[in-house]
Image: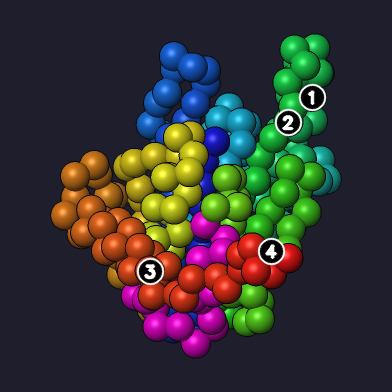
Amino acid sequence: MTYCVGVLVEEGLVMVADTRTNAGLDDISTYRKLHHFNVPGERVMMLASAGNLSITQSVLSMLQEGVPGEEDDEPPQKLVEAPTMFQAAQLIGRAIRRVRAIEKDGFEAASIRFSISLLFGGQIGNGEMRLYLIYSAGNFIECSTDAPFLQIGEHKYGKPILDRAVRYTTELYDALKVSLVSMDSTMRSNLGVGLPIDIALVRRNALTLEVNHRIEAGEGYFHDLRERWSAALRAAHRAIPRPPYGPADK
């Protein structure tokens, strides 16, 4: 399993991803799931992945080397060449469908499900900063101001925290903090999600990463965040009055 979250607020974009990949009970490895496609001053784009690792790597390689055109005379296109974020999301969808077409027979013969989902966010030139969730079929949805975050992977444990704490007007570093709390809650409930954690933060119209950091085991801030959040939850439930229910209600 994995867990990745993207939060798009008024000030900019935050993306957070774990690195744990489980290929069996005795094969737990670390792979980067948050990837950057950046040209400083021109574009900043981030891609977080969940699903089958071989499919993810094939799609990423195709986006780097060039996605074949839909027509025979159409040249391959790299992700960094897409003119808009919308067209970049379309290109990613096309790459997924192309990999599916190539690998379909082998996957079906081995009874392996074609599984991939991607969070794609960033900004190109003067265009709008955007965040998309791209599915295995290559179709996608876009983040909105009413729902300013998207998740992939093991998302159910971290979603309630984001629902309660994140708004489009949330300050950018607060969005990062809440995303890390969401990641911690997921890690505590699912051993398939774990450290290290990759984080990236970019301000709207900056066209360059302001934060590009990997949180390793034992890092002071993340350890303190986990302890403070646990203590805050304990204090909150102690402060709530005892339920007024008992035998007298019968």
Distance between the alpha carbons at the discs numbered 1 and 3: 54 Å
Label 1 sits on what residue type? Lys
Which residue lies at the image location 24% right of the left edge and 42% below the top edge?
217
Q: What residue does disc 1 label?
A: 104
Nearest to the eye among marks 1 and 2: give it.
Answer: 2
At which x and y percent is residue 47? Answer: 52, 53
Which comes before the other along the chain, label 4 or label 3? 4
Nearest to the eye among marks 4 and 3: give it.
Answer: 3
**Is residue 223 on the magenta stretch?**
no
Residue 238's disc is 3
Label 3 sits on what residue type? Arg
Q: Which residues are magenta?
A: 158-178
**Is there any visible trace of residue 148 in the rendered image?**
yes
Which comes before the other along the chain, label 1 or label 3? 1
Predominant secondary structure in magenta? helix
- The quadrant in which the C terminus is found is bottom right
